Image (cartoon, rainbow, N blue to C red):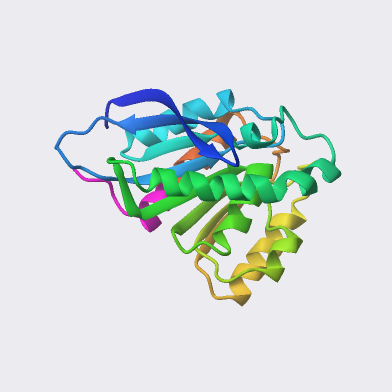
Amino acid sequence: MYSVSNLQTTFESGGKEIRLECFLPQMTMEGQRYPSVIALYGSGGDHAGMAEPAAQLASHGFAVYILHYFDRTDTERVTDKATLLRHAPAWLKTLWDAVNYVEKQPQTDPARIGLLGFSLGAYLSLAFAAYDSRIKTVVEFFGGFPREARFFMRRLCPVLILHGEKDNIVPVQEAYDLKQLLEKKNVPHEMHIYPEAGHGFSGEVWRDAGVRALAFLQKYLGSPPP
C-alpha cells in the first residue's frame, strides 16, 4: 500500500479554469510513473463523494484525477436531457484537454490511462473512449453507451460494467445493451449486475464493486511499480 497525497490543480479548457483533484501515490524513486485514472462524477456533480474511491485507488498505486468538467459550462447539476445534450460536446472537449494535461504529469505513465465514470460520467467516459486511443480501459458505474456516440465510434477498449437491477434512473437495459455491443465488437469486458441495488451503491455492494474495479484496472492498466 502507498501513502497518498491529495492536492488540487487547474488547467485551461475553452477559456475556463478547470479544477482537477489529484490523489497521488507517494513516489519512492525519482522518475517513477504510475498507471493513471481520470474520474468523472454524475449529473449531481458530487465530486466530494468520489474522494474516498480515488484515495483507495491511489493507495494501490494509481494516480487518480477527479475532473470537475462542470466548470467548463458553469454547471452545478444536470436535471434535464436538453441541458445534457447541449453541454456534452464541451464536456468531452474538457476531457480531451484533461487527458492532454494528465499525460504530461511526471507521475503519469502516458501509455496507461483509464477512465472511471459514474452515471453521466460513465456515459461521457464511454463516448470519449470510443474515439481516443489513449484510453486503455473504462470502469463504468450505472451508466451506458450513448446512442449518438455510435456515429463517431472508431474503437472500443476493455470495459467493466457495474449496474443495479433496480436502477430507476438509468435502466439496467443500458448495461445489457453495452455488453451486447462489446460482444459484437469482440472487446474484452466484464459485467456484474447487483439484483437489489438501485442507482448508486452502498454497503456490501459498494465494497464488492470497489474490489472488482481495482482488479479490472490492475488487469488492463498493469500493476503499479513496486
* 91 in relation to 41, above or below: below
Residue stretch in magenta: 215-226
Instruction: Give the residue displayed 14% in from the left and 38% down from the top.
Output: 30
Left or right, 24 with respect to 81, comes to left
Instruction: Pinpoint residue 115: horizontal percent, then vertical percent.
Output: 50, 48
Tell me if residue 180 is in the magenta stretch. no
Left or right, 102 with respect to 12, comes to left
Which residue is at the front of the view, 192 or 180? 180
Query: Splitting the image into 4 quarters, where does residue 37 fall?
Result: top left
Query: Splitting the image into 4 quarters, where does residue 169 fall?
Result: top right
Q: Is residue 143 visible?
A: no
Left or right, 177 with respect to 128, comes to right
Instruction: Pinpoint residue 42: horizontal percent, then vertical percent.
Output: 66, 37
Residue at the extreme left: 29
* 163 in relation to 111, above or below: above
* 173 in relation to 55, above or below: below
Instruction: Give the residue displayed 71% in from the left and 70% down from the top.
Output: 151
Which residue is at the front of the view, 70 or 53? 70
Instruction: Pinpoint residue 117: horizontal percent, then vertical percent.
Output: 58, 44
Which residue is at the front of the view, 164 or 152? 152
Residue at the extreme front: 15
Instruction: Pinpoint residue 187: horizontal percent, then vertical percent.
Output: 52, 70
